[in-house]
Amino acid sequence: MSFEAISNFVAAILTLFIFSFLYKDNPFYKFAEALFIGVSMGYAIPLVYENAFMPFVYTPIFVEHKFIIIIPALMGSLYIFRFTKNLSWLSRYPIVFGMAIVGMGVPMSIHSSVLVQMRSAMLPMDNINTIIIFIGTVTILLYFFFSKAHRGFYGKVTNVGVWFLMVGFGASFGYTVMARISLLIGRIQFLVGDWLGLIK
Amino acid sequence: MKRQIPLIIVICMGFLFAAHTFIPHKVSADFYTWWQSWSKAISPFAVFLGVMSLFMVHSTKISRKLPNWQFSVITLAALVFTSFSGFMWGTMEGTPFMWLFKNVQMPMGATMFSLLAFHIASAAYKAFRARSPEATVLLVAAIIVMLGQVPLGTQISEWIPETSKWILNVPNLAAKRAIALGVGLGMTATSLKILLGIERTYLGGGE
């Protein structure tokens, strides 16, 4: 048995263990699940060390001799205190240092999600599609306005918004199904082709 | 003071960043660069939180012999072995670390996500059984969009890809735009609440 065949065997067995959940929750699935969590977390640690710790902490301090970086490194190590009873307040400092970026988030979210979308919505209504888009956007926004009861004429208008939302959700649902089915096809191709060699 | 000082840091630095967006002066640009280098130096330590949390949860399960504690041993052993192999033999192609990624982590991740195809099919069946007009509209839109992306759709009718394109470009665009506007307003409101010290849950519990 070649090394590649052993590798494929391991991957195939673990794939089948996960698929066994379709029957019901069982020890094989639980084993694969536990292994997946451990390997995923274990995979992240050396990558964080190589791609974040080495270039942004070790190299500036020990290679470039920027000793000021010791301060944020010490601040980062305060995260450990999150799990202590008396000193957990110390872990707030690295968190709030990162949270400060919300100041930039206010104008940026107004610009990217509100103003840009509003500008794109303000098109000349010279064809039926732009009129439908305008009606859809306004009625959905009205649907999400909960300060007024959805009754009478207003209720009918917001109901139009619900129909637009359903079409939008349907499109997203269709795309999600296609993405998952494509993953499923990939796994079945692996099992039948790479592992069992039944398809070339 | 254990809560007030962090709060003051967020408010002061937050307003400085808000000002930096409108006034990109050299002083504020330098301040932003300084913040970035410090943030990058702080961020790798956050992985401690994840590892420690996982260790604490699973070691408690093992020590108390809670139901299915044996699987916690597997999780911790896999964590230790995978990270050890990364530090010991490197993370390049051909190392045990990459073998674990290609033959353990990646196949299981893809299979885990592909399981959702079955759950989605079950959810679609339940929605269809509900027989409400809204659920029917959702399913019809989903079916047309799916058929519009595959050759089968064109074989059934020339109109299916055209209708699929229209659904995506017109009613779907209206829905996505309205949702984006709502999300944008929500993000702005939440950011303002943090900036003004109204939202404090990120500080955690305790004093």
Image: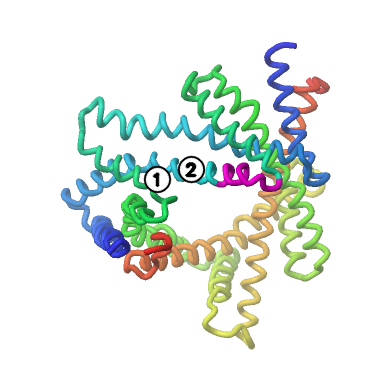
- Residue at figure coordinates x 38%, y 49% from the top left: A81
Front one among A36 and B13: A36
Front one among A17 and B68: B68
Mark 2 and mark 1 on one chain? no
- Estimate the x, y position of residue B98 in percent, counting from the top left: 56, 23
Give the amino acid type for the residue marked by disc 2 in the picture. Answer: Met
The stretch in magenta equals B57-67
- Would residue B26 be found to the left or right of residue A30 on screen? left
- Which residue, as the protein is rendered here, is positioned at the far bottom? A152
- Which residue, as the protein is rendered here, is positioned at the far top? A2
Q: Is residue B41 above or below residue A5?
A: below
Secondary structure beneath label 2 = helix
- Estimate the x, y position of residue B57 in percent, counting from the top left: 56, 47
Q: Quadrant of residue A15?
A: top right
Q: Is residue A137 above or below residue A4?
A: below
Would you name the residue on which mark 2 appears? Answer: B52
Give the amino acid type for the residue marked by disc 1 in the picture. Answer: Ile
- Estimate the x, y position of residue B119 in percent, counting from the top left: 75, 51
- Residue at figure coordinates x 60%, y 56% from the top left: B169
Q: CB of mark 2 within 8 Å of CB of mark 1?
A: yes
Chain bearing mark 1:
A
Chain bearing mark 2:
B
Q: Say whether residue B137 is magenta.
A: no
Q: Quadrant of residue A12?
A: top right
Which label was assigned to residue A80? Answer: 1
What predominant SS class does the magenta segment belong to? Answer: helix
Q: How many marks?
A: 2
Q: Is residue A143 above or below residue B45?
A: below
Give the position of the N terminus of chain B as an image quadrant. Answer: bottom left
- Residue at figure coordinates x 41%, y 29% from the top left: A50
- Estimate the x, y position of residue A19 in percent, counting from the top left: 77, 39
